[in-house]
Image (tube, rainbow, N blue to C red):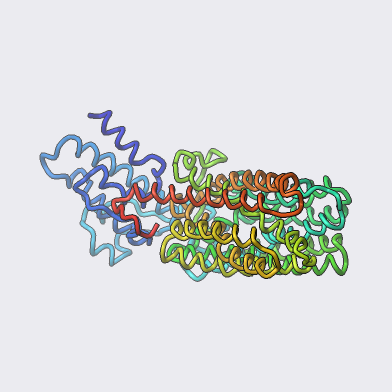
Amino acid sequence: MHDQVDAQLRQWKDGKQQNLRALLSSVHLLLPNFTPIGIHEIIEASKVKRAYMRTIAKLHPDKLAKGVDLRTSMVSSSVFTVLNEAWDAFKAQEGFVIMASSDANIKGDLTVESTAALSQTSITSTDKNARGETGPTIRPPDCAFGWIPTLAVMVNYMFIFGASNSYGVFSTYYLNQKFVGTSASTLSWIGSLITTFMLGCSFLTGALADKKGYRLTAYIGTILCTAAYILASFCNHVWQLILTQGILFGLGASFLFAPSVSIPPQWFSKHRGLASGVAVAGSSLGGLWFTAATQAMIDSIGAEWALRILGILTFVVTGVMNLFYFRRVPAKPRKNILELQAAKRLTFWLVSLESFAMYTGYWALTFYIGTTARQLGGTFQDGSNLLLVLNAGSVVGRILAGLIADKFGSINTLLLSLLLTVVIEMPLWIKATSLAPLYVLCALYGIVSPTFISLNPVIVSNHFDTDVLASVMGMTNLFSGIGGLVGNQVQGVIYDKYDKHEQFTNTIVFSAMFVLFAGLVIACLRFHIIRKRTDKRFFQKV
């Protein structure tokens, strides 16, 4: 019996020893006489506190009914211990200053035993850095102060993603003017490596952000991105641009991106989707003015000075925004660089696989819509205008996706958007014979397709501890970086070898099939999450 009970306990707490919400919502799986607690019922910290105290009051050794069977006694004792340890971690994470008499609403609901237990576990903040990057005090989620770091992230996203979203302007210029005769697959290395290094290196920069601080990490990124722009402005060969505008900028963007991606979900609970959408909308806003400004500067003062000016702007603006990178929750001490516990969970691998598939197929339209416009008789300005429409649609889509996700669930919203992306991309792009369908394509694709960028952090924050978000997101983004590299290179080869610079049919099919595969992966994730719930209805908020 001891072995059987131990096995059940290990399965119950596997990967969530310090996740009090997950533990409370699954106690009934070990002790069927317990009333199930839905995870949606304990989103707010005060409700977690109430549910915890009620549960340990029932599990306290002195409160067990006489004559209870040996198994129930053993399980109750072990669960009591595990929940108390998770409670300590939860208090440190939330930064509570808790006294038994400090919450009249909760005290009225608790027994003498549970109130005494609460008093025994009263704490103040356990992190000596609580007055550093966490701001003057550790604040509750959904407070107004959270919008300050969230808006700072939005501005920085303009510069982090603006470079990749507007690379289509540089790509068109390089392909048709500066490096005429160079294959598209060769030039695509520049844009590919921006995304690959930005995302692929974030598993290390994310761990650095959790360990050394968000601001320090972000300032390293500012310096590297600025240096990349300035050095690229003096390059006259493709391989030089690959090293500077591609690799060096991508590495710098990774230092900026890793802390940025974990800030909005950390500060919000009820409006987590909206906050993430507002922050990520900055990437599309950046694409808007980056695209317009870059095209205008290339036409008027040349590509070299365009790169230098972008470098100066990046240094000044991100340097100021980094000052507002506050954590809400102190990072917990850790020995390992990677958050290895996350890799033991199927949820992590499904999110990672979806990220890989999306970044494999997503960037085709961004990189090749300008060249498509040229093939249909348009000008370089038409290609730039199409990118503007694409990014304008993305601003609307990312914020709208956050609002919808808060109401109907982030996974439900993401699944629908991925399926719609395939339906929109294939017929409109393949059948386009004039510029008009391309504008419709860019508007709809911009609204629907990029929701994964804003919703993936929400999904991760809903299923992993807040204090390791930068690390876990960095690990999933490693797969995003690999997908970006593989996808962009394969698309370049397909365009050179099979589409022969005359059409984009094969490139479009390749892109759409990977987006469809990402949708199937998210459908599997939805099934996996529902399967673990007591409520197994197909139509529910996930």
Q: Is residue 268 left or right of residue 478?
A: left
Q: Where, quadrant-wise, is the C terminus in this rendering?
A: bottom left
Q: Position of residue 480 (x, y in %)?
A: 60, 47
Q: Is residue 202 left or right of residue 375?
A: left
Q: Would you identify the image quadrant in which residue 124 lies?
A: bottom left
Residue at horizontal 45%, vertical 49%? 464
Q: Would you identify the image quadrant in which residue 82 lies?
A: top left
Residue at horizontal 32%, vertical 50%? 533
Q: Position of residue 93 (x, y in %)?
A: 45, 53
**Observer able to see residue 341:** yes
Q: Position of residue 279 (x, y in %)?
A: 58, 64
Q: Is residue 280 left or right of residue 78?
A: right
**Observer able to see residue 87:** no
Q: Position of residue 221 (x, y in %)?
A: 70, 53
Q: Work out whether residue 303 or residue 40 is closer to the camera in this orientation and state it.
A: 303
Q: Work out whether residue 432 or residue 446 is closer to the camera in this orientation and state it.
A: 432
Q: Where, quadrant-wise, is the N terminus in this rendering?
A: top left
Residue at horizontal 67%, vertical 51%? 195
Q: Is residue 175 left or right of residue 466?
A: right
Q: Would you identify the image quadrant in which residue 46 lies?
A: bottom left
Please state the total of marks drawn on the protein image.
0
Instruction: Point out the residue furthest to the left here.
Output: 67
Vertical comparison of 20 with 443: above or below: above
Q: Work out whether residue 246 or residue 490 is closer to the camera in this orientation and state it.
A: 490
